[in-house]
Image (cartoon, grey):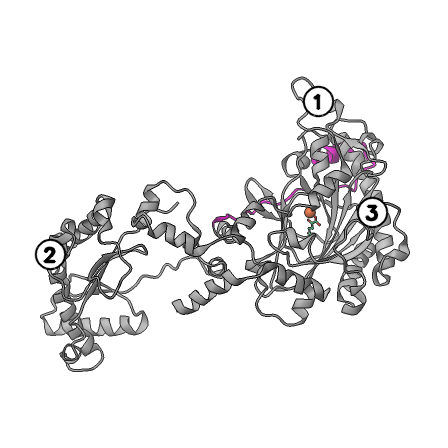
């Protein structure tokens, strides 16, 4: 087993990320291309960093729901006021809400989802001409992940992007034929809804209805039409990393698959799809303009075993040309509420946004790439102070060699929470009585067959001896580090008593008491005498449980050689 793990670790060391990314990119077939090729394992570039996966293990899943706002009564004064209040509250507390009864016909919404599916599912050759990583010159392009090579983990999705950064009005002929009509139709409606929203958001900020519109916030739009294929290992990757949007606000259409999550009170909240609903989120620009009254909140999409999931985000980004300065709105700042941000140019902001990985903590990824395992092991080995030494030195992060491989951590996520079953307990009392002995043999047989492990009680070893043993072990590990050092060794073949990092005191072969560390000598000898005797009894019982003569295993000298490993598990940060 450990051999396989070793080779995995070596493989990890040999991993050439840029080669993998290039090979993937050269296919121009995106993530869908991988799935169509029938992959069973996902490429390393899609696997999230280990510390992220580990964090996921301790995350609590929220049962809260993003606010749902019905805007059907916009023309009625009272209803209008209520809608503005709801939008204010949601924008302040969540940065996210869902709109229902927004007036966009369901046929238009369905057409948009369908058109996106058709684009991504058309012949790979036809899609290739749109494949490009160049954001600055291509108005319509299809790609897998924004600037893949710089991000720490590639995302399990493909996107078709319609002009955000490139100047000029998009002409319908530029949109791929399979989805052209549907997109033009949807854009018309969603832009109108965007204008209504700009009006409502202005009022929610306590401004005149046309304030945001006059600032041309809703003027420019960009669309990203996503396709999240089914994923063979959804727990290892993400549909899209957590991020906030570089926009004033975003209107998102999602199909019924689910997977979008927003961060709220430090928990991921699922944005449950609503038939014909639209998701709205406040982007970074509006957070800045509102001087933090409204919040631009982290969101992400989880990968799933079933797919595809389809969504289309329409970003309202304001004008880029001529460059226009945006900053906290004058009416919203005062002596008590001074501006928290400098002015910025929308185009520059977006350029910066896309020149960094979606998730900002990228330095971590770089560190991960430079990792030298043998150096780390040597650094832990050299002080001869083992794990306890690390704990004593007050580490806050655990060294990388202790971190389990991502596959294992992810598997842990999938496992049902720890079982409530109990390992069998075998009571050895009154073992001299024939009936009792028969019952004990039966119990041992059953436990050995079903579990391979069981607990013994009333085994006859005095509690003082047991306590002495744990106490002696603690004393050994907690004695002065200098005194322990002489026992520190990885040499299994010549050292009969040795202590090592990973990380026990091991005693093997025929031991003379003097060889044992002074601090636990008496207790270990005492315990060994008891446990050896118990071992003999036990082999006798096991022989019978196997249906053999009582001394069968003893005659084979099974009980003859013993080794002891005395462990010490320090607290772990
Ligand atoms: O696909 C989604 O639901 C979210 C997409 C998204 O967050 C984005 O495009 O910025
Ligand atoms: Fe987003």
Provide the secondary structure element on which disc 2 rests.
Answer: helix
Q: Classify mark 1: residues with Cα within 10 Å, few (<14), some (14-19) or many (20+).
A: some
Q: Classify mark 2: residues with Cα within 10 Å, few (<14), some (14-19) or many (20+).
A: few
Residue 395 visible in the shown view? yes
User: Which residues make up the magenta segment?
Assistant: 58-87
Q: Residue at x 81, y 45 (%)?
A: 221
Left-right relation of 181 to 457: right
**Res. 333 mark:** 1
**Res. 215 mark:** none
Query: In the picture shown, does residue 81 fall above or below 125?
Result: above
Q: Is residue 475 magenta?
A: no
- In the image, 400 versus 495, the foreground residue is 495
Determine which quarter of the picture holds residue 74.
top right
Q: Residue furthest top?
A: 335
Q: Residue at x 73, y 58 (%)?
A: 143
Q: Residue 352 placed where, x, y %?
A: 70, 41
Nearer the observer: mark 3 or 1; the answer is 3
Q: CA distance from mark 3 to mark 2?
A: 81 Å
**Res. 166 mark:** 3
Q: CA distance from mark 3 to mark 1?
A: 33 Å
Residue holding disc 2: 514
Provide the secondary structure element on which disc 1 rests.
Answer: loop
Left-right relation of 475 to 141: left
């Amino acid at each position: 087993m450990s051999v396989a793990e070793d080779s995995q670790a070596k493989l990890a060391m040999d991993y050439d990320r840029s080669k993998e990314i290039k090979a993937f990119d050269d296919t121009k077939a995106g993530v869908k291309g991988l799935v169509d090729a029938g992959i069973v394992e996902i490429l390393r570039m899609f696997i999230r960093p280990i510390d992220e996966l580990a964090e996921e293990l301790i995350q609590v899943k929220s049962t809260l729901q993003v606010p749902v706002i019905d805007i059907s009564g916009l023309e009625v004064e009272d209803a209008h006021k209520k809608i503005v209040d709801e939008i204010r509250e949601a924008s302040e507390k969540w940065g996210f809400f869902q709109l229902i009864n927004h007036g966009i016909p369901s046929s238009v919404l369905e057409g948009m989802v369908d058109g996106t599916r058709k684009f991504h599912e058309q012949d790979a050759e036809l899609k290739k001409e749109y494949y490009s990583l160049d954001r600055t010159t291509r108005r319509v392009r299809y790609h897998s992940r924004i600037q893949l090579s710089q991000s720490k983990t590639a995302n399990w999705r493909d996107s078709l992007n319609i002009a955000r950064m490139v100047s000029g009005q998009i002409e319908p002929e530029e949109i791929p034929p399979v989805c052209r009509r549907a997109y033009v139709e949807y854009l018309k409606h969603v832009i109108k809804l965007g204008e209504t929203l700009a009006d409502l958001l202005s009022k929610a900020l306590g401004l005149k209805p046309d304030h945001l519109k006059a600032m041309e916030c809703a003027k420019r739009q960009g669309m990203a039409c996503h396709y999240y294929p089914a994923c063979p290992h959804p727990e290892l990757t993400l549909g899209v990393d957590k991020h906030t949007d570089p926009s004033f606000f975003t209107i998102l259409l999602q199909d019924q698959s689910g997977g979008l999550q927003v961060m709220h009170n430090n928990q991921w909240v699922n944005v449950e799809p609503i038939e014909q609903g639209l998701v709205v989120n406040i982007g970074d620009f509006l957070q800045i303009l509102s001087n933090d009254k409204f919040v631009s909140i982290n969101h992400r999409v989880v990968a799933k075993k079933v797919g595809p999931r389809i969504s289309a985000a329409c970003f309202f980004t304001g004008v880029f040309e001529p460059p226009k300065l945006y900053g906290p709105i004058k009416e919203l700042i005062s002596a008590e509420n001074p501006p928290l941000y400098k002015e910025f140019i929308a185009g520059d902001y977006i350029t910066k946004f896309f020149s960094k990985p979606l998730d900002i903590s990228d330095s971590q990824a770089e560190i991960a790439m430079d990792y030298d395992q043998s150096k780390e092991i040597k650094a832990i080995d050299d002080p001869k102070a083992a794990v306890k030494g690390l704990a004593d030195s007050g580490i806050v992060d655990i060294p990388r060699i202790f971190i389990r491989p991502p596959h294992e951590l992810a598997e842990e996520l999938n496992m049902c929470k720890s079982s409530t079953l109990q390992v069998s307990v075998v009571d050895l009392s009154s073992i001299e009585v024939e009936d009792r002995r028969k019952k004990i043999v039966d119990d041992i047989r059953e436990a050995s067959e079903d579990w391979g492990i069981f607990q013994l009680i009333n085994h006859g070893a005095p509690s003082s001896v047991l306590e002495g043993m744990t106490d002696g072990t603690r004393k050994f590990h907690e004695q002065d580090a200098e005194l322990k050092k002489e026992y520190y060794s990885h040499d299994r073949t010549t050292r009969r008593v040795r202590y090592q990092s990973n990380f026990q005191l091991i005693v093997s072969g025929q031991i003379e008491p003097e060889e044992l560390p002074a601090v636990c000598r008496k207790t270990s000898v005492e315990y060994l005498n008891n446990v050896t005797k118990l071992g003999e009894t036990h082999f006798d019982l096991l022989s019978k449980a196997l249906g053999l003569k009582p001394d069968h295993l003893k005659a084979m000298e099974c009980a003859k050689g013993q080794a002891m490993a005395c462990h010490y598990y320090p607290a772990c940060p």
